[in-house]
Amino acid sequence: MAASCLSEDELKEQRFFEQRVRAVTHVFDHKPLAFTHTYGCQQNVADGERLNGMLEEMGFEFTDSPDNADLVLYNTCAVRENAENRVFGNVGALKHIKRRNPDMIIAVCGCMVQQEHIAARMKQRFPYVDLIFGTHVLHKFPEMLYGIYEKGGRLVCIPDSDGVIAEDLPVRRESRFKASVPIMYGCNNFCTYCIVPKVRGRERSREQADIVREVKGLVESGYKEILLLGQNVNSYGKDKGTSFPALLAELDALDGEFMISFMTSHPKDCSHELIDIIADSRHISHHLHLPVQSGSDKILKLMNRHYDTSRYLDLAEYAKRRIPDIQLTTDIIVGFPGETYEDFTATLELIRKVKFDSAYTFIYSRREGTKAAEMDDPVSDEEKGKWFRELLDLQGSLGEQAYTKYVGRTLRVLCEGRGRTDETLLTGRSRQNIIVDFAGSDELLGSFVDVKITMALPWALTGEIVK
Ligand code: SAH
Ligand code: SF4
Ligand code: F3S
């Protein structure tokens, strides 16, 4: 579908509603407080930053607990059942708070409630939820919130994709150094297990010039890592007469010291050209997240992934040859309908061959409305659990040694903050997107430093700054 951008008038209208909400909350005897939480992938996190941006424009400040909030907003994910169960649990827990504070507004948005049956269940089970809205009307949040304040009652708004792209929404970024930049929305791939195409609509790419302008502005205002986002960045620009490698090449030509990373790459249209551009780049991260999902050609076909293991192995081998320090990571699903133990062992075989630095592993979760939900699924949960643990054990032992090759080397690291487990250390990310901890002072935050690696853990490196 050819995507159009929202008109300036439509955007202005929402800025107008932001001011109306501000006027409503102005009469409170305190600054309005919002508690917001986003589940799911980086795209959803990017949406969450925009929702927070709009809330900020509406005069809200933020709190980290729903207890004293005037507004609670859950931005949800539908990718697996346990993601949804968590939201049901957390919304359920708001009942008592709402009883104490009946003026609190509760809103639930995002992928999960874009599914009609879930929105209906949410509405029925939680009568105290005021506002439910889907993924395609995120930009109308101010208007919907104003409607609730003005008229009271409940509002459910989950239209299908209208294919518009909302440029220039207010955004409240979580980090001072890292900025995510969506380059496209939606997905056309219809992997048979996956709910994303249903809840996010068809692919829409942003204009290349808009993206370049945004990235340039971010770099000029001091951001050091730019994360380009799309469900399948490799199909960026197909509807715009351009391509992902072309976008990357233009961004790589920008001046300044900064890093560009991206996710996610679908192997079906990941090309040698893309790998060459990364290899020859100045700014692009040496990290390729290339979800393989399964090592069995039969299962890949049933998943509708449009590649086989030999293509995948070729890509992995080429990436390692052209970019020797590449960090290669993947996603794997265990227990897809019809998968046999033999298919599963083919996945083990593949991870032995590729030697991923790390793998995100999931047990198949049946999603209503997908093709796989209709397939025969005879293997028991218990059996799938056993396979899953076998996979974890193997990847654990392969991943254990993955980072030892960096010991003794000096890596350039973007210094991002204090260590999560050890506050006395600074933590940052290398060009390979590996966490690196080292001693240093706060004035290094947001700058690049050279760190000599002294120790490797399976998930991080430790080192010392090279003077
Ligand atoms: N667009 C990305 C992935 C989005 S979802 C891509 O195609 O690579 C992130 C991961 O969740 C997927 O790679 C897949 O491994 C997993 N996933 C998606 N749907 C799932 C399901 N129904 N059950 C289990 N895992 C699933
Ligand atoms: Fe889901 Fe496949 Fe699209 Fe990824 S590419 S979002 S797994 S349908
Ligand atoms: Fe989840 Fe929606 Fe992302 S389903 S993984 S939040 S696109």
Image: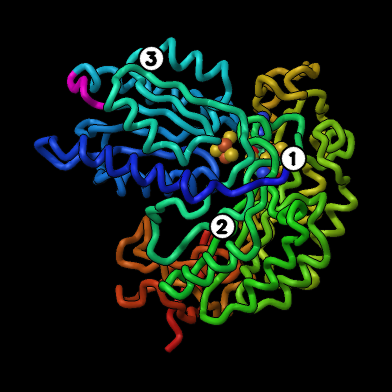
Quadrant of the image occupied by residue 293: top right
Q: CA distance from mark 2 to mark 3?
A: 43 Å
- Three-letter amino acid code at the position of disc 3: Phe
Crowd around label 2: few <14 · some 14–19 · many ≥20 (10 Å): some
Q: Report which residue position mark 1 lands on.
A: 188
Identify which residue, 291 or 35, lies in the foreground: 35
Image-based side of 70 in relation to 256, left or right: left
Residue 458: mark in rendering: 2
- Three-letter amino acid code at the position of disc 1: Asn
Image coordinates of residue 443 in percent, x first then y, are 31, 77
What colour scheme does the image use?
rainbow
Q: Which residues are magenta?
A: 100-104
**Camera-nearest label, 1 or 2:** 1
**Camera-nearest label, 3 or 1:** 1
439 within the magenta span: no
Quadrant of the image occupied by residue 421: bottom left
Q: Report which residue position mark 3 lands on.
A: 126
Image coordinates of residue 288 in percent, x first then y, are 68, 60
